Amino acid sequence: MVKEVIKRVPLLGDMARWIYGTLKTKQEPFPGSAEYWEKRYSTGGGSGVGSYAFFAEFKADVLNRFVSTHHVQTVIEFGCGDGNQLSLAKYPTYLGFDVSSTVLSKCRELFKSDPQKSFRLMSEFAGETADLALSLDVIYHLVEDNVFAQYMQTLFRAAIDTRSSTPAIPTTIAAMRGRT
């Protein structure tokens, strides 16, 4: 009887059906970030809304101006995706990494006439560095703590010269330490 009343209440009935359907549907366990993206790309999915239209154009405008203004010669990107964002970029030399071999094959084909662009699996990262290291719309997709931590270490290793230009000097300032 209560069930029939809820069904007839305009918004409440729809919401109750949605909640019931969501709870009833058996969710597959999350396979992991790498497996998710490989499956997504191998079944025809793309990089997502952030790599297309307004969002892609906005990021390309900002990054292209930055590269030009700061005379960036080399760019490395972790999570290069399907290449749509890259198609708007004006980078002198580019190295893109991704976890999906499917999407890397697509990028190699898409940019085969541009010898300044190359692509590799994340597992093939061997400490390469660049003037600019990018991670566009990737970090919030890394749901596993260990994957996130490893990714951030890789990203910063590729971008930052960890040697400080400040010599190890004696100081009384507790929040300052020179490193070599």
Image: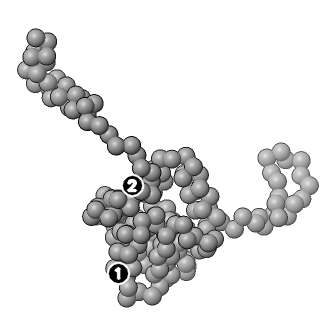
The reply to whether dot 2 and dot 1 touch (C-beta < 8 Å) is: no
The amino acid sitting under disc 2 is Tyr
- Mark yes or no: residue 124 visible: yes
Q: Position of residue 144 (x, y in %)?
A: 51, 47
Quick check: 79 left or right of 15? Answer: right
Q: Residue at x 61, y 68 (%)?
A: 158
- Mark yes or no: residue 131 visible: no
Q: Nearer the viewer, residue 165 or 26?
A: 26
Q: In what quadrant of the picture does the C terminus appear?
A: bottom right
Q: Residue at x 39, y 59 (%)?
A: 37
In which quarter of the view is residue 14 placed?
top left
| Placement of 28 over or under 63, stated as above or below | above
Q: Pointer 1: what residue?
A: 109
Q: Pointer 2: what residue?
A: 36
| Placement of 113 over or under 163, stated as above or below | below
The amino acid sitting under disc 1 is Glu
In which quarter of the view is residue 59 placed?
bottom left
Of labels 2 and 1, earlier in sequence is: 2
